[in-house]
Amino acid sequence: MANLFLASEILEINVEEERNGAAFYTALAEKSKNKLVKSTAEDIASQEKMHEKRFQDLLGRVEHRESEEQYPGEFNAYIDALKGNRIFNDPAHAEETAKNVSDVDALQLALKTEYATLKLLRELRRHIDKGEVQYVDLTIEEEEAHVNQLNQLLEKL
């Protein structure tokens, strides 16, 4: 598989994931009555918006080209596998979910989302130009911090 895994496609998925995450955390912050949940969700939502912008900017700099498949449908199967880890279909689904679950359930769901995002970022890291790896690494560090924040918050609830 010479050019199957394209950074541009993975970046597009990351942009969507960050947008969904921001919608989820914003809705959680708006509905939660717990001050600690509210402030943490607001903080993470702000960071997710920053990540979305970072990936959108990076998307404008990476090379867009056709994938090289060894068999018909190979590339779409790869993209479907990456998207299979998604928790939310779109921002509206993310918002609706945050509004209709308890704070604890929302935080547990958020953890699953963060782990899925980390998996996607690690895949992106393998396929992106070495000059852009620093941006992915920075985002990985920030997403790992989200995992820590969410775990600490869950322990307090």
Image (spheres, helix red, strand yellow):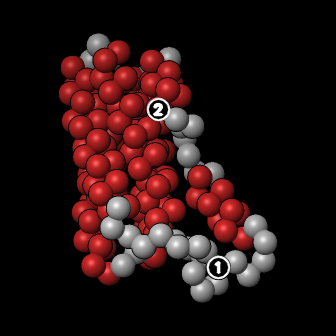
Q: Position of residue 38 (x, y in %)?
A: 25, 23
Q: Quadrant of residue 66?
A: bottom right
Task: Identify which residue, 97 or 33, lies in the foreground.
Answer: 97
At 60% from the left and 86% from the top, the residue drawn is: 2
Left or right: where 71 falls relative to 62: right
Q: Position of residue 39 (x, y in %)?
A: 21, 27
Task: Identify which residue, 80 or 116, lies in the foreground.
Answer: 80
Q: Quadrant of residue 77?
A: bottom right
Can residue 152 be seen here? The reply is: no
**Amino acid type, mark 2:** Pro
Left or right: where 90 falls relative to 37: right
At 39% from the left and 31% from the top, the residue drawn is: 23
Residue tagged 1: 68
**Amino acid type, mark 1:** Glu
Instruction: In the rendered view, tell whether residue 74 sits above or below residue 154.
Output: below
Task: Identify which residue, 33 or 127, lies in the foreground.
Answer: 127
Residue tagged 2: 91
Q: Position of residue 101 (x, y in %)?
A: 49, 20
Secondary structure category for the residue under label 1:
loop
Circle nearer the N terminus (1, 2)? 1
Quadrant housing the C terminus: top left
At 34% from the left and 56% from the top, the residue drawn is: 55
